[in-house]
Image (cartoon, helix red, strand yellow):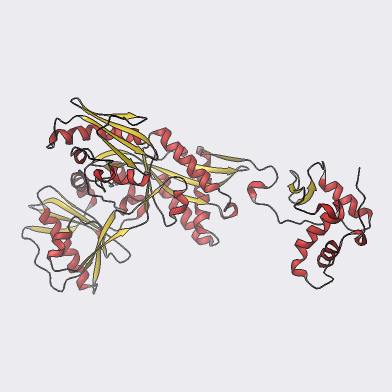
């Protein structure tokens, strides 16, 4: 049954006013679209039932437009068109722009890992996300993402987490399998990179959905930690990543006069074919006991230059007695930054020689300041008479995916440190109460045992932490006693020691 439409003169004054605005008779066309919608509702359904009084906006499954219909109307489009054509008027037009891609018709959304035949589509999606409307930039970004994905020695298709809308890859997050040093112990890490959404599908929440899927995927696989670099912290914070602001660097004013390099030290450019294995061993030795650095097996050393295009002129080594004992890698647009430096045990002087050579070269080039991406050599550099400012990178974020498993991986090192400390022989229980789960650290003669679940009420110390604070504690950037309720045993410092944090741009995802 079709309701009889009302004549304009049958409508109350406010509805007649809407009709004049909708038809443009009073010259106010800028308000016409909104008024037209209200006028149609008044004519079709009666002035007593204007929008907001028992009516709703409905989008039909077979039409990309919306109309105001009563909740009991079975076929709103047919009813609307019939009433208008009966009065000799044309059918009403669309009153809503075309909906987003994910809601058009019966769009189907899948969030999952990519299949082998979808890897290229995922890479192209990331390229479009970063290239946007510039075709040349899209090609360049697609090529870059292709290299870092396919040259990664640990690449697997399912590490590309994707959102698929009606068969089209619309959003992507890439997980990179790595191991990160935590208190000197390598633990599984999921590095996050190549995060992007095709411009045609943006602002629909797809990226958040894929990030949530990536977090669940990493947890299932035992990747206990995750990290990423970004300038949009709030976006990733919604899914649990926390800002980490403990990566320090030195801004160094180049001194007017520099001392002579230590005798017996020769500096030359790196010959990777012959020096690579030695540099890798020095890096591993120099990174002992730190947190944040990526553990680099041989295959990772070999793969990274394939996607980064490292300039050989920015790699240097220091020799003593014909043996390589230290290395340096420069970075920055003009090579005005020491990205990474390390030395073999007992050869700190060779590292000093590398820094002096770097400062001297920059002084000859007219530079007044340089950056060193570690604070390890800060006191020595300051002793040169250089003006030093310590800064912190603010773009890095971490997420703990499984706190209990992470603690289990660290427990053997905890036992060794405690046995070698002044608190050797101490026994007791430390409870960690955090936003991401509760864990108890039980210390017995046999060593350290991790217990998942409710904290022990009889524990000797209880640490109450946020997710961010748990990350800072695990990575050795805060004193554990800071979070203890009441008195804290001194053994806490051996279990959660203060450690130096290092991150090298060479290891970026």
Could you tell me which residue is drawn at 29 percent across and 44 percent down? 483
Q: In which quarter of the image is residue 62?
A: top right
Left of 91 or right of it: where is 447? Answer: left
Could you tell me which residue is drawn at 78 percent across and 58 percent down? 37
Could you tell me which residue is drawn at 31 percent across and 30 percent down? 457
Q: Quadrant of residue 419?
A: top left
Residue 179 image point, x, y percent: 31, 40
Instruction: Please name whichever residue, 73 or 299, is drawn nearer the observer in this view of the structure.
Output: 73
Q: Can residue 296 be seen in this view?
A: no
Left of 337 or right of it: where is 45? Answer: right
Extreme top residue here? 446
Q: Quadrant of the N terminus?
A: top right
Count of marks overlaid on the render:
0
Relative vertical location of residue 52 with respect to residue 438 in this rendering, above or below: below
Instruction: Please name whichever residue, 485 or 96, is drawn nearer the observer in this view of the structure.
Output: 485
Extreme left residue here? 263
Residue 150 image point, x, y percent: 42, 44
Relative vertical location of residue 232 with respect to residue 438 in this rendering, above or below: below
Extreme front residue here? 486
Could you tell me which residue is drawn at 81 percent across and 67 percent down? 21
Instruction: Please name whichever residue, 425 or 276, is drawn nearer the observer in this view of the structure.
Output: 425
Residue 384 image point, x, y percent: 12, 66
Q: Is residue 494 visible?
A: yes
Left of 129 or right of it: where is 9? Answer: right
């Amino acid at each position: 049954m079709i309701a009889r439409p009302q004549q304009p003169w049958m409508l109350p004054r406010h509805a007649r006013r809407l009709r004049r605005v909708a038809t443009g008779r009073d010259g106010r066309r800028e308000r016409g679209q909104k008024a037209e919608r209200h006028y149609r509702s008044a004519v079709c359904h009666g002035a007593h039932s204007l929008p907001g009084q028992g009516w709703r906006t409905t989008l039909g499954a077979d039409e990309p437009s919306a109309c105001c219909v009563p909740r009991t109307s079975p076929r709103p489009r047919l009813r609307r068109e019939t009433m208008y054509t009966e009065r000799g008027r044309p059918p009403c037009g669309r009153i809503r722009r075309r909906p987003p891609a994910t809601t058009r018709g019966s769009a189907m959304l899948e969030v999952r890992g990519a299949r082998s035949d979808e890897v290229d589509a995922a890479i192209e999606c990331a390229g479009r996300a970063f290239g946007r409307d510039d075709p040349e930039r899209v090609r360049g970004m697609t090529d870059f993402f292709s290299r870092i994905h396919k040259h990664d020695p640990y690449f697997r298709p399912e590490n590309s987490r994707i959102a698929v809308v009606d068969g089209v890859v619309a959003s992507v997050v890439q997980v990179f399998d790595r191991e990160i040093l935590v208190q000197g112990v390598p633990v599984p890490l999921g590095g996050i990179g190549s995060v992007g959404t095709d411009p045609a599908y943006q602002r629909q929440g797809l990226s958040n959905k894929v990030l949530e899927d990536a977090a669940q995927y990493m947890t299932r696989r035992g990747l206990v930690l995750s990290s990423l670099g970004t300038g949009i912290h709030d976006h990733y914070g919604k899914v649990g990543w926390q800002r980490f602001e403990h990566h320090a660097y030195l801004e160094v004013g180049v001194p007017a006069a520099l001392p002579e390099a230590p005798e017996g030290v020769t500096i030359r450019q790196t010959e990777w074919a012959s020096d690579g294995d030695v540099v890798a061993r020095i890096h591993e030795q120099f990174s002992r006991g730190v947190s944040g650095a990526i553990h680099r097996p041989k295959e990772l050393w070999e793969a990274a230059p394939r996607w980064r295009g490292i300039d050989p002129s920015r790699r240097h080594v220091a020799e003593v007695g014909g043996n390589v004992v230290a290395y340096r890698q420069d970075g920055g647009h003009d090579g005005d930054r020491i990205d990474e430096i390390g030395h073999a045990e007992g050869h700190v002087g060779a590292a000093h020689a590398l820094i002096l050579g770097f400062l001297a070269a920059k002084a000859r080039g007219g530079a007044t300041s340089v950056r060193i991406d570690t604070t390890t050599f800060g006191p020595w550099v300051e002793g040169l008479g250089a003006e030093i400012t310590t800064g912190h990178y603010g773009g890095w974020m971490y997420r703990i995916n499984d706190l209990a498993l992470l603690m289990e991986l660290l427990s053997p090192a905890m036992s060794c440190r405690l046995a070698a400390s002044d608190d050797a022989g101490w026994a007791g229980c430390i409870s960690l109460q955090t936003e991401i789960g509760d864990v108890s650290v039980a210390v017995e003669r046999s060593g350290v045992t991790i217990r998942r679940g409710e904290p022990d009420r009889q524990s000797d110390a209880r640490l109450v932490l946020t997710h961010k604070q748990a990350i800072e504690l695990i990575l050795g950037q805060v004193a554990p006693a800071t979070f203890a309720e009441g008195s804290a045993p001194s053994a806490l410092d051996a279990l959660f020691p203060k450690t130096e944090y290092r991150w090298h741009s060479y290891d970026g995802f």
